[in-house]
Amino acid sequence: MIFCGLLTIIYGGISAMMLQNDSTKKFNWFKASGKPSTQNDTWFINSEPEKHHGIDTTIFNLEEYNGIQRPGIEYTNAGNMGTAAFPLVFEHQKRVGFNLGYNQFDVYRILKDSIRYYQVVRPYTELRLLLGLQNEQMMDGRFANQHKHLIYYGVHFKRYYSKGIYENQRANDNAVNVYAIFRSPNKRLHLKTDLIFNSFKSRENGGATISVFDSSLFQKILVPVALRKAENLYRQIDFYLNTGYSIGKKYKVRDTDSTYTTELMPVFTISYQLNVESNKIKYRDYAPDSAYYQQFYNIKDSVANDWNVLKTDNAIQLDIVWRKLQSDTAYLEKNLVAHAEAGFEHYQIQHNLLPTATQNLYVSGYVRSNNASKSNIIYYAAAKTYLYGWNQGDLLLSAQAGYDFKKWGIVTGNFAYTQTEMPYQYEKYTSHPVQWNFDLPKTRILSGGGKYQNTKWGIVAEATYYRTQNLPVYAGSATPQAGFETSNFVVIHAGNKNGIKGFHCDNDVWFTQPLGDSSSNILDLYARVFTRHSLYYERRVFKKALWFSVGVDLRFRYQNNPPYYEPYLATFYPSFNNTRLIPQLDFFVNAKIKTVRAFLKVDNLISAITQKGYYALHRYAAQDLSFRAGINWRFFE
């Protein structure tokens, strides 16, 4: 019945759109001004508002739906969609500041830095739905609109639901973002607001207690699990309000052949930003196992861990965009954007009904190239430091420099250094009968490397050197500690996306090479080799009314030790269990008629071919062979 309903939706959508043109195509409309502005029907992110991206209407990678299969470094989860996820390759997270330590759902969250703000001239809607045989559901929707080019607003929601293959494994993830942007007619005043809501309800079974693949049991739901009534509840509400005033010279904009209006060319903008964020985390287990929880086991009928953190952040910001007035009716974008910020954070923390508070004072800034200037020179330099408070001494330094050789590709070099306090729960934890108050060393990560990318030829090659010190580790029943005291290693990535007459072979390979014996510990958490391959054929038929592709996605993990996932403190730590080669083979069919896109996918064919699966995380087996179908509908008006 589920798939009959889904196919009805797909057929109805296709039939409805057969008589219409593809409404997601651009109209080549430009604002009537002395200097052409950004094309309509695009989106941008907050960190680069001058760089606009066209709305994607292709069918490439349409079958990657689950949040962990994504451009760049991919993740592995705890056995089913929406569960705790961990990256397969080490990546330098260039962020410092307060971190409570609950990051297992970060890959599914809506984050302020990744929000897409749309610039459209007509109401835009995008709807996406997926259903699967393993009781999976995925919904994703966007809406964006504007009013007289003064107010832009939109909403984005997404939901992952998966029952899982084991007892007590259900995941229910929900995320919503609502934004609004107001710019006054004279371009002097702006007002921006964001409201983000992330909610995760994940039943935690602690993994199987016996080896799933060596068992004679046929139904995995019958395999005994460590926890039978445990659940993680996590809710985040994040509100931003930014208001600013711009200063600059004025220029004339043509309204008609004979009339002009005067507008501002913004150069300096001073802003005030208010951020209020609430994080509530609740862990419950009403049938605890004393052997599993060990020192956290306090009463026979339940185990609980509650966090309630309220953050208030006030910041003053200054932005400079270098622009030069060429005449009374036009200006030139120069290759310089600068930003400076000073802020004060206050954290009200309640852990298991015991209140405390802490503060942070920070300053930050960056200078970077301006995408609107069309310069071939690419550069970026940023710094952030905490002068006072819980994160005093935290430091971020980041730099990038490169050159765009146009058809010959882009060459860039990068450097980053972070020094940050351990996650809060690693240093302060209070409950009965367990408590600790540590002064752990700061985590230090140094990275540097280079990258070559040529979009026209479809190739990318990069190498990055890492030096890590004092990575946070929670070693099972032990106390939190600084692990991998010093590790030196190199991560090499090479990829291509090429096709000949409809036949495509896309490949990505990540290779991690430790430098020195002690540095090989990094392989206790990350795969030595992770590869991703996509072989498919795509073509347009029926007078190009139908666009389809059919092919397979193949992934390998070599010398991979899937880490433990400990749900009580939401930590990942080494399992020290060498595993065999881990392959995953998926078959897919993608299709598009006008604005309706749909896919059919068979996941993990390897499990049917070899009759033996593999662990996604330690004791968490990946899902077996399954069938899924999805639809994506984008339209205006």
Image (tube, grey):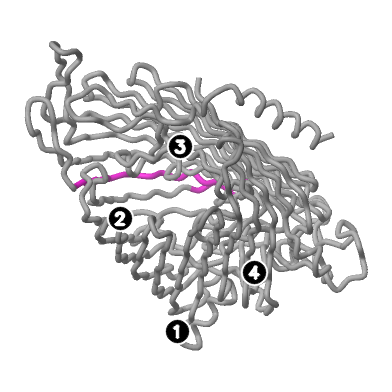
Q: State the extent of the magenta-drawn residues as a range.
A: 336-356
Q: Nearer the viewer, residue 587 or 513?
A: 587
Please, what is the three-letter code of the amino acid marked with disc 4?
Answer: Pro
Which structural element holds mark 3?
loop
Q: Which residue was labeled with disc 4?
A: 563
Q: Foreground mark, 4 or 1?
A: 1
Coordinates of residue 446 in the picture (x, y in percent): 37, 70
Instruction: Give me the disc on residue 384.
Output: 2
Q: Distance between the residues labelled 2 and 1?
A: 29 Å
Q: Foreground mark, 2 or 4?
A: 4
Image point (16%, 13%), residue name: 257
Residue 398 makes an appearance in the image: no
Residue 144 makes an appearance in the image: yes
27 on left or right of 352 = left
Q: Distance between the residues labelled 2 and 3?
A: 33 Å
Please, what is the three-letter code of the amino acid marked with disc 1?
Answer: Leu
Q: Which of disc 1 and disc 4 is earlier in sequence?
A: 1
Q: Nearer the viewer, residue 277 or 409?
A: 409
Q: Residue furthest left?
A: 327
- Figure label count: 4
Please, what is the three-letter code of the amino acid marked with disc 2?
Answer: Lys
Image point (32%, 49%), residue name: 361
Q: Which residue was labeled with disc 3?
A: 55
Residue 598 lies in quadrant: top right
Instruction: Give me the disc on residue 515.
Output: 1
